[in-house]
Image (cartoon, rainbow, N blue to C red):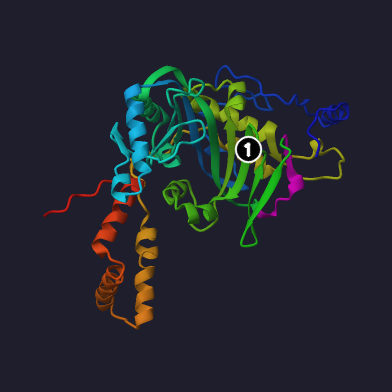
Amino acid sequence: MSNSNTKPEIAARERCGLQADTGTVQPQGTAQACNSSGAVLSNTAPAKYIDYINIKPLRCAVDSLYLSYRGNINPKMEELLDFLKNMAQHTDPEIAAGAFLHFGEHKFQVMPKGAGKFSYVLKDNWFTIQVSSGKSSSVPLAYVQISSELLTFTNLDEIQDHLDYLIYSLGTVKGHPSVSRLDLCMDFQPLAFNVESIEIQQWKTRATQIDRFHQHKRPSGWRIGKGQVMGRLYNKSLEIQKSKKDYLKPLWESNGWNGVSDVWRMEFQMKRELLKSVGLKHPHQITELSPAIWKYCTTKWLQLVTPTEDSYESCWPVTNAWNEISQACTNTECQAVKPVRKERLPHDQYLFVNGLAAISSFMAREGISDLGEALGEFLHEAERYHLSRNQRMEDYLQTKALEKSLRYNTQLKKSKE
């Protein structure tokens, strides 16, 4: 499909009653922009008043946010981070387990390696912070990824204030943070919209690359583009079976999800240059500008159309389902506010389903049906196994717990002598 504005293409658009598409985004000085009917877009327009037939919108949100801070690291902080980074590389697990940084009510894991041009990486359940060395004058002081869970349940201004405090503790910050990447998403329950039946020719887009994905021979999603803008339409219900982001389900249910149907997600990933072109430079503009950005992505950059006999694809009508998707996101503020833990804790299924697999296997191997007997025998055999390798089972478990406490951003309680 052609996306260039050749003269025949412009003539075709005029014949179809459409404006010529210049291929550029008009800069936005405010949150307002006009849709095709001239109506002003606003992040306060109540999408719930739209008569939805094809989809049931469940949630519009900022799903990912990456910020850059210019500045210079404090020499003493760099010395500390360098020490902790070397500690994380130690071959002794007990020493490596001490590679964490306590500050701002966080216990960050200091990773044994940097990332790209950034010398240090700090991680917990709220933030992944990449920090540059004082020797890297051309690299920002910090590059921060804010977790999706934190964005789901915390107001963006509150996140920003907390993050500013952390980064200012690392060194000298110059100017305001800039938005390096922004992902906007909408979760929806299909009604009269058969998402799995979409064909590749239905995508009208400025992107040149379109990829389709399947899971267990079932259509699971699409990825459109790979540059400054990337669109993804995928089965979120299938995805969270792996990611275990079950915290989304109560939000969906509060907006009418029946708890059974698959939930799909339309998502746009936008990078710095595109965001600058729409006037979004600072995080505090996101709530204000995101409705207009969503409108641009779903009317100018990407559309789902119905093929007709017309040889000009630009004249193919936009599907009703896509029009509903385009109109649905008028507010991306968090729907529910609740505390989000800073620790990266394993979910219950991992502990109490996967973790019991060894016990059930042992019971089957030994032909034991009584759980109490099985646990006793299991511990006895485990102790015997580790002694045969010249170590105590308690020492082995203590070492593993230390390693995982660093990964989970937790602290082991001191044993009572």
Q: Quadrant of residue 409?
A: top left
Query: Does residue 204 show up magenta in the picture?
Result: yes
Residue lying at 60% horizontally and 49% vertically, measured from the top left: 234
> Magenta stretch?
196-206
Q: Is residue 300 left or right of residue 116?
A: right
Farthest left residue in view: 417
Q: Quadrant of residue 230?
A: top right
Q: Secondary structure at mark 1?
A: strand
Residue wearing tag 1? 230
Is the residue 37 above or below the residue 243 in the image? above
* Nearer to me, 229 or 57: 229
Residue lying at 82% horizontally and 45% vertically, measured from the top left: 308
Q: Quadrant of residue 217?
A: bottom right
Q: Is residue 203 left or right of residue 190?
A: right
Q: Is residue 18 left or right of residue 39?
A: right
* Nearer to me, 108 or 35: 108
Residue 72, x across and y down, in percent:
41, 20
Tag 1: amino acid = Met
Residue 38, x across and y down, in percent:
66, 24
Residue 186, x across and y down, in percent:
55, 41
Q: Quadrant of the N terminus?
A: top right
Q: Quadrant of the C terminus?
A: bottom left
Question: How many marks overall?
Answer: 1
